[in-house]
Image: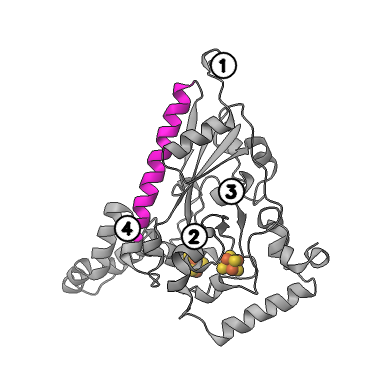
Amino acid sequence: MVGVFQTPLDADTIKAKARALGADLVGIADGAVMDAHPPDPRDPRRPKDITEHDGGRVIVLAKRYSAGTTRIARWDERHKYYNDELVLTMLEETSLELVFWLEDNGYPAIIIPPTHADPWLYRGDRNQHMTTVLSLTHAAVEAGLGTLGLNLQLITPEFGPRVLVTAVMCSVDCETDGRREEALCLGPECGRCLTACPGDVVGHWERDWPACDSYRSPHGFSQLAGHLGDILEAPDDAARLDMIRSETSFNLWQSILRGAGVISGCRRCQDVCPVGEDYARMIGDSLEEIPEATPEKARRLAAMAEAEARGALPGSYAGQERWIGALGYLGSDAAE
Ligand code: SF4
Ligand code: SF4
């Protein structure tokens, strides 16, 4: 019985420790509540699917991106990839330090990183969208950190969507945080995430995830498998050598070296979102204009806003309502 060796810990103590270790935001979700409310019942990915012992609490940690990189408007800017990868490295180290501190206090703990997908679920399609073993954005909502936006990105009051998230699972008997009931997202009347998206993959409370992946992870597994296949199918040795020495190989090599361009990539939708205390203070002046805007995108957003105004919310909203929240901007009648 590990209980004999445990030091009592409350939520405030755990959060103060996580902040001291470098986290910007911390929330604690109830693992049993997450077990009861999987974001996708066809692919539940619940805490209890990972561990039957140590999923009682899901401590969600968030670290903000640097504002300097957010102010760069190009989605495929490698400085952004590298800076974001360093933020992730810091957050992972913070998570690991928290795990060892919890274990020093008698509570076995486990990190859920944002980069690990279950390889048993890979079906041989290099363009298959691979998800994390636990949805960290949904965990963050359950931990009270924010709500999901029009493209299902996590939005926080402090930094909008401009955060990276990890979780530490641990069965420590402490208080949990409640979900926000009202959406932080401003809906299609804002729609800046859709307007700025270089792949045009944002829908009405949904996103084409496989299409997004080629931007979110531009030098990831899909490009690697495609490039190796192209090399094998090249007509002769000279063409093969050219491809081995190509810029694509160079980008892949650099990305495999550090993960930049693999686990970090496009985040235009996060950059331009006006929600977050940081936006006016650090960002807004540089990202007001959106070069990716088109009349067709504007028409689509107007149609979404018009449908919502007459109470016609899409099925994609209904399926994620718990995590998106009530659409206060519609008024109480239309949002119900
Ligand atoms: S990450 Fe990039 S491609 Fe994906 S939804 Fe956001 S802006 Fe679009
Ligand atoms: S950019 Fe606008 S529509 Fe998109 S998530 Fe942010 S608030 Fe919502």
Q: Say if mark 3 contacts mark 2, CB within 8 Å.
A: no
Give the crowd class for mark 3: few <14, some 14-19, many >=20 residues within 10 Å: many
Q: Is residue 322 above or below residue 110?
A: below
* Marks 3/4: CA–CA distance: 25 Å
Q: Is mark 1 within 8 Å of ligand 2?
A: no
In the image, the segment drawn in magenta is 81-105
* Marks 3/2: CA–CA distance: 15 Å
- Examine the rendering and report whether any part of residue 101 can be seen: yes
3 or 4: tag closer to the N-terminus: 4
2 or 1: tag closer to the N-terminus: 1
How far across and how far down the image is residue 78, in percent? 31, 65
For label 3, the SS is loop
User: Badge 4 is on which residue?
Assistant: 82
User: Badge 1 is on which residue?
Assistant: 3
User: Badge 2 is on which residue?
Assistant: 278
How far across and how far down the image is residue 322, in percent? 70, 53
Amino acid at pointer 2:
Asp
4 or 1: tag closer to the N-terminus: 1
User: Badge 3 is on which residue?
Assistant: 145
Q: Residue at x 70, y 63 (%)?
A: 317
2 or 4: tag closer to the N-terminus: 4
Residue 82 colored magenta?
yes
Give the crowd class for mark 2: few <14, some 14-19, many >=20 residues within 10 Å: some
How far across and how far down the image is residue 189, in percent? 65, 74
Name the magenta segment's main secondary structure.
helix
Q: Residue at x 51, y 81 (%)?
A: 293
Give the crowd class for mark 1: few <14, some 14-19, many >=20 residues within 10 Å: few
Q: Is residue 154 above or below residue 310?
A: above
* Mark in front: 3 vs 1: 3
